[in-house]
Image (cartoon, rainbow, N blue to C red):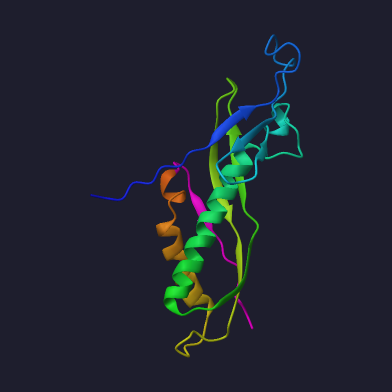
Amino acid sequence: MPALHTYDVDLVWLGARDVGTVSYTSYGRDHELRAAGRPPLPGTSDPAFRGDPTRWSPEDLLVGALAQCHMLWLLHLAAESGVVVLDYADRASGTMRIEAAGHGQFRDVVLRPHVTASATTSSGTPVTDELLAEVHERAHEHCFIARSVNFPVDVRPAPVTLR
């Protein structure tokens, strides 16, 4: 039987103000995500929907979760492959389409990871863009979040920086 993992998060709305949801403009979108042993994550709606631009929106978190998942799998698979990753950064972006009736959905997310690695693997093989591309591809195939969404997640790695 496959392993099952459960993730528990508490969501607390902080935006009732004095009158609650008597109108679309009467309430705040601020909320917190909480989980045992972690600091609260300040959330809101997208600023286009009256959210606070200094807080995280669900859309930001979805794009961030895809970037995090890819990075964590890449680090895991790099270690297994003998590729020594020394630095990792990503400039991820997602595009969401809103239809006339207000329904929306993500069209795609693009990950743009940039990896700095040792010039050779632990076995002495040179680290190349091709080798790292294979690790990125395997990481994408393993990413739980990317496997769970119904839109394309495109991984466009920058050329590897060697140290």
Q: Nearer the viewer, residue 78 or 126?
A: 78
Q: Nearer the viewer, residue 100 or 68?
A: 68
The answer to which quarter of the image holds residue 14 is top right
Q: Residue at x 50, y 73 (%)?
A: 132
Q: Is residue 5 above or below residue 160?
A: above
Q: Is residue 63 magenta?
A: no
Q: Residue at x 54, y 45 (%)?
A: 108
Q: Is residue 76 left or right of residue 37?
A: left
- Residue 144 locus on image (x, y percent): 43, 51
Q: Residue at x 54, y 41 (%)?
A: 107
Q: Is residue 141 left or right of residue 30?
A: left
- Residue 139 locus on image (x, y percent): 45, 62
Q: Is residue 162 above or below residue 108?
A: below
Q: Is residue 129 above or below residue 137?
A: below
Q: Is residue 153 magenta?
A: yes
The chief SS type of the magenta part is: loop
The quadrant in which the C terminus is found is bottom right
The outermost residue toward the front is: 37
Q: Magenta part of the protein: which range? A: 149-163
The outermost residue toward the top is: 22
Q: Residue at x 43, y 77 (%)?
A: 81
Q: Nearer the viewer, residue 125 or 3?
A: 3
- Residue 37 locus on image (x, y percent): 58, 46
The answer to which quarter of the image holds residue 105 is top right
